[in-house]
Image: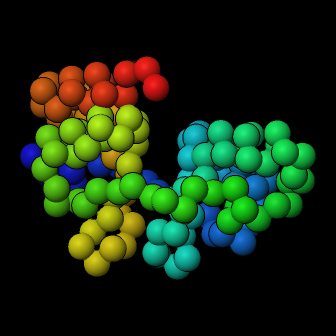
Amino acid sequence: MKVAQIMNTDVFLTAPNRSIREAAETMQRMDVGSLPVGDGDRLVGMVTDRDIAVRAVARGLNADTPVRDVMTQDIRYCFDDQDVDDVARNMADLQVRRLPVINRDKRLVGFVSLADFAHGADNGATEELVKGVATPH
C-alpha cells in the first residue's frame, strides 16, 4: 500500500511572512496543531502550536511576529508513492506523529498522520509507528 492511499489531502498552508496570530487563527479554525509553511507550493518549514507557545509567547514576542521567526526549517517528509510500511518505520525512528507528503516534483500534496495509519494501513505498520512515537525521549 502506498502513502497516497491513506494520506489526507486537506492541507492548509501559511506563508513565512504571515503573523503567528494569523497562523494560530488558521490552526483554530481548521482544528489542527501544525501548519506547513509554503513559499508558493514549495514547503519551506512547519509551524506548530508548540512553536508559537515556546518560541514566541515564552520569549515575549508579540502576535505580529512573522511565522519564519518561529517555524522549524528542518522538515522531514515522505513521498506519496512510498510504501506505508517504510514510512511508518521512518516516522517511528523520528518519533513523529505526522509528516508532510510531497510528490516527486517536491510539491506538497498532503499529510500523513498516526490516525491515517490507524484507519487505513495494515496493523503491522500501525503497531510499529505507535511503539516508535510512544517511546519516551
Tell me the residue at 90%/46% (across/down): 60
Residue 125 spot, x, y in % from top left = 17, 32
Tell me the residue at 35%/41% (across/down): 94
Tell me the residue at 34%/46% (across/down): 112
Horizontally, residue 48 falls left or right of residue 20, namely: left
Residue 127 in view in this figure: yes
The extreme left residue here reads 1
Scheme of colours in the image: rainbow
Q: How many marks?
A: 0
Tell me the residue at 21%/51% (across/down): 3
Above or below — where is 59 with respect to 40?
A: above
Residue 46 sits in which quadrant? bottom right
- The residue nearer to you, when weighing 92 against 1, is 92
- The residue nearer to you, when weighing 10 against 52, is 52
Horizontally, residue 69 falls left or right of residue 89, namely: right
Residue 123 sits in which quadrant? top left
Residue 48 spot, x, y in % from top left = 61, 46
Residue 72 spot, x, y in % from top left = 57, 56
Above or below — where is 42 with respect to 62?
A: below
